[in-house]
Image (spheres, helix red, strand yellow):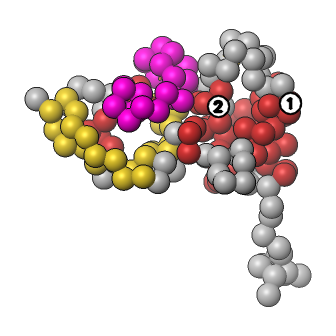
Amino acid sequence: MRHPLHVTVNGIATGTEVESHRSLLSVLRDEVGLTGPKEGCDDSECGACMVLLDGRPVNACSYLALQTDGREVTTVEGVADAEGLHPVQRELLEAGGVQCGFCTPGIVMSATALLDSEPDCDEDQVRRALAGNLCRCTGYQKIVEAVLRAARSRPRPLRGPEGGPQQ
Ligand code: FES
Ligand code: FES
């Protein structure tokens, strides 16, 4: 039996019907046509399927699609804008943090969520944020460097003399 599902995906309202056992990952890939989120382990171990659900990173393989009804999902296809790649994507390419690329969409999503919540993050925070993303190719160092460079490259709000916003 199929049930109606309404999700906003990358800012676009999307409606479909899905069976109750379908994962968010399978619906994104097979119904919505977004193949950025990858199926690695299908068991919450590798992070290749990472997406943002209402701004927080989740493993899409382990979420029932119907649990996301009425919510907002962002995939790697939704992080670049008209001005170009997201800073995390750009710095991953610059730093050589992409090899086979299978882990990259998930890493981009974990890193963008971190930069949104902790724009001044340090290396320890980056490593903790990426702890659920496995990469078999790069050894992680270049990925961590890329995320730190992306954090430093983002514009900061101007601060007044008391540390508050500049008037
Ligand atoms: S495919 Fe979802 S965590 Fe590995
Ligand atoms: S670049 Fe190959 S798994 Fe990370």
**39 within the magenta span:** yes
Amino acid type, mark 1: Ala
Q: Which is the main secondary structure of the residues drawn in magenta?
A: loop
Measured in 3D between alpha carbons, the distance from the residue under mark 1 to the one under mark 2, in whole angstroms, is: 14 Å
**Label 1: few (<14), some (14–19) or many (≥20) C-alpha neighbours in 10 Å:** some
In the rendered image, which quarter is residue 162 located in? bottom right
Helix, strand or loop under label 1:
helix
Q: Quadrant of the N terminus?
A: top left
Helix, strand or loop under label 2:
helix
The answer to whether any part of residue 32 appears in the image is yes
Looking at the image, residue 52 lies above or below residue 164:
above
Looking at the image, residue 71 lies above or below residue 29:
below
Q: Residue at x 85, y 43 (%)?
A: 149
Q: Residue 72's spot in the image, x, y percent?
A: 42, 51
Please state if 77 lies on the left or on the right of 121 as rendered. left
**122 within the magenta span:** no
Q: Quadrant of the C terminus?
A: bottom right
How many discs appear?
Answer: 2
Q: Residue at x 89, y 82 (%)?
A: 161
Which of the numbered marks, if any, corresponds to residue 107?
A: 2
User: For the magenta stretch, what is the residue range?
Assistant: 26-48
| Mark 1, residue position | 95
